[in-house]
Structure formats: C-alpha cells, structure tokens
Amino acid sequence: EPKPVIFSGMQPSSDSLQLGNYIGALTQWTKMQEDYDAIYCVVNLHALTSAQGEGDLAERTRRTAAQYIAGGIDPEKSTLFVQSHVPAHTELAWVLNTITGFGEASRMTQFKDKSQKGGIDAANVGLFTYPMLMAADILLYDAAFVPVGEDQRQHVELTRDLATRFNSRFGKTFVLPQAQIPKTVAKIYDLQNPTAKMSKSAESEAGLIKVLDPANVTKKKIMRAVTDDGAEIRFDREAKPGVSNLMTILSVLGERTLDSIEAEFEGKGYGHLKQAVAEVVDETLTPVRERTEELMADPAELDRLLARGADRANEIAQRKLAEVYDALGI
Ligand code: ADP
Ligand code: NA
C-alpha cells in the first residue's frame, strides 16, 4: 500500500528560519514524513522572483536545506532536493502557462499584492507566472496533499483547476491535489507587534525569533517582548496579545497546557514568564542551530544529500513530464 504523496516547498529567502516557520511548518513536516511519501523542495527558482542578487543564493539554499534536516526532516525518509536541480519543474511550468488564462492568473491575490507594492512596472513577469511554476512543482509528483499556509490556498486551487483542464483536454495525467491547512497548529506572533504574525519579511527583526541566532540574542529579544497592561498571566488573545503569544510559545515548545501555565505563574510577574519562554526556546533551538552549523561545515556532504534527493525527484518528475509530452503529442 503506497503512502499518499505530499509536496511542500520553502523559499531560501532568508539566512534563517523564524520560530513560526519552525512550529508552523518544520515540525509539522517532520511528523508528516512518517505517514506520507513526503517531497520537500527548496524552491530557489521561486526565490528569483524576489530575492535576486540579495546575498549568496547558493549559500542560502544550502542553509535552508540544512535547517530542515537539523529540524527533523530525514533525507532517508523524505525526498529533499533543490528545485533548480530538477529541470522538469520549469518545463512543465511552461506547458501549464499555455493552458492558463491571462485573466485567471491576474486574479491571484498574491500577485496583486506583490505587484501593487512596487507598482506594476517594477513587477517581473516571473511574479505573474509564479503560480504555474508552483502548480508544476505539485503536479509532477502526483501529490495528493499540499501542506501550506492559508495564503497559498488560492494557488493550490489554481493547481487543481489546471490539472482538471489538462486531464479533460489531453487525457488523465495529473492527480488533483488538495491544500492541507492544519487548523490546530499554533500561530506565532511578532514579539514587538503581537497582533501581526511573526515573519521573516518583518520590517524590524526586534520581534523575530530566528532559529540560527545565538541564544543570548534570542533571550534578549524575549525579555524585551511587548507585554500588556496589568500584571496577570492569563491567556486572552484580544486583551493580552503579548502575554498570550508568550504563553503559546511556552505551551507548544514545552508541550504543556495553557491552564498549567496560568497555574504555575499565578501571582508571578511577566519577567518569570519571559524567563521560562527563553529557556524553552533555547532548549528547542540550540540543538537545531548546532546541527545546522555541523551540516554547513561540510558542504560536500550536504551537496551529496541534496544530489541524492534530486536523483530521486528527477526520476519521478522525468517520467511525469514524458507522460505530459506524450499526451500533448510533442
Ligand atoms: P515567512 O512569513 O516567515 O516568510 P512563510 O509565509 O514563507 O513564512 O511561511 C512558511 C511556512 O511557515 C508556512 O507553512 C506557514 O504556515 C508557516 N509560518 C510562517 N509564519 C508562521 C507563524 N508566525 N506562525 C505559525 N506558522 C508560520
Ligand atoms: Na514569506
């Protein structure tokens, strides 16, 4: 009985993941690799649409992969590879471009958001065709599920539409994928602005817990986290977003209930809570950081792991692409 395939990609858009990525994505993907045939891709071609020339992309690509392995993705269990190592992604993306409506692509809210930021003349065409490359990423592997954030739901819907269209015009070729957006996964907020989600692309890093930062830097940020009026340690997203965020972090990483945290800190000040959060974050991230540095210290070995992932991915992707070309008669 083959396991269902899941595909997920991550952009090498930063030198370090943030705690939200660790909790919201990486630990989920690590769990999922047990029950699914998991394909995890560092999508460096997608990163070209926004991160061109920002530092060393090869280095960031390795560092992203290293953090995933350090955080629990096992390259023996999962297929972990770099997008540009598998040319079928761009080849299938081209085919999908030719069956996508211009209006359909124009309706993608992420394109609208990103192109509006700098003005349409500053946007590159890659930003426009991004969803078709993402569709190719998914469809090449017959992925049944795509674990993503809410912001990617529309792209997965487009992927389904394109798969359905191709199948009906050219014969059944693609599996229809489904977005898998876990409802129960905690959302982590910015320490300085606890109503906004923690994000790599935050304007200031003061509220960002970076996986690869030294422990003392992270501790300082946690001790300076914005709290709320009053002194009570109580979970209340509306009235006490800062305290609630710290409690969430302690609850998820410490594997304990919010009730037990409220009970432990009854009558104690925010400083005690922050201290406990700093400790659990340190216990969690220090091994990830150390393992990442080990992997980065041996780039040849890391490249070998990624090349093996690419071999596996190429085998599957080439087969699917051949089917597509057959169906198209080219
Ligand atoms: P970022 O905003 O840091 O660039 P992405 O939008 O690229 O993060 O998200 C990558 C993955 O990490 C997604 O699966 C998303 O759900 C998860 N994720 C990102 N930020 C958070 C957060 N603050 N809390 C929980 N999960 C998050
Ligand atoms: Na992002």
Image (cartoon, rainbow, N blue to C red):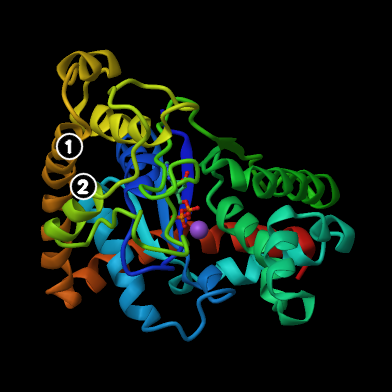
Q: Is residue 131 left or right of residue 144?
A: right
Closest to the observer, 309 or 217: 217
Residue 290 spot, x, y in % from top left: 11, 59
Q: Nearer the viewer, residue 277 or 104?
A: 277
The C terminus - image quarter: bottom right
Percent position of residue 20, x then y: 37, 46
Furthest-front residue in view? 230
Any part of residue 291 in sight: no
261 or 123, which is in the foreground?
A: 261
Amino acid type for the residue under numbered disc 2: Met
Query: Residue placed farthest to the bottom in the image?
Result: 53
Give the quarter of the image for residue 281.
top left
**Residue identifier under label 2:** 223
Residue 89 coordinates in the image, percent (x, y) = 57, 66
What residue lies at 31% left-to-right and 40% top-to-bottom?
27
Q: Are marks 2 and 1 in contact (CB under 8 Å)?
A: yes
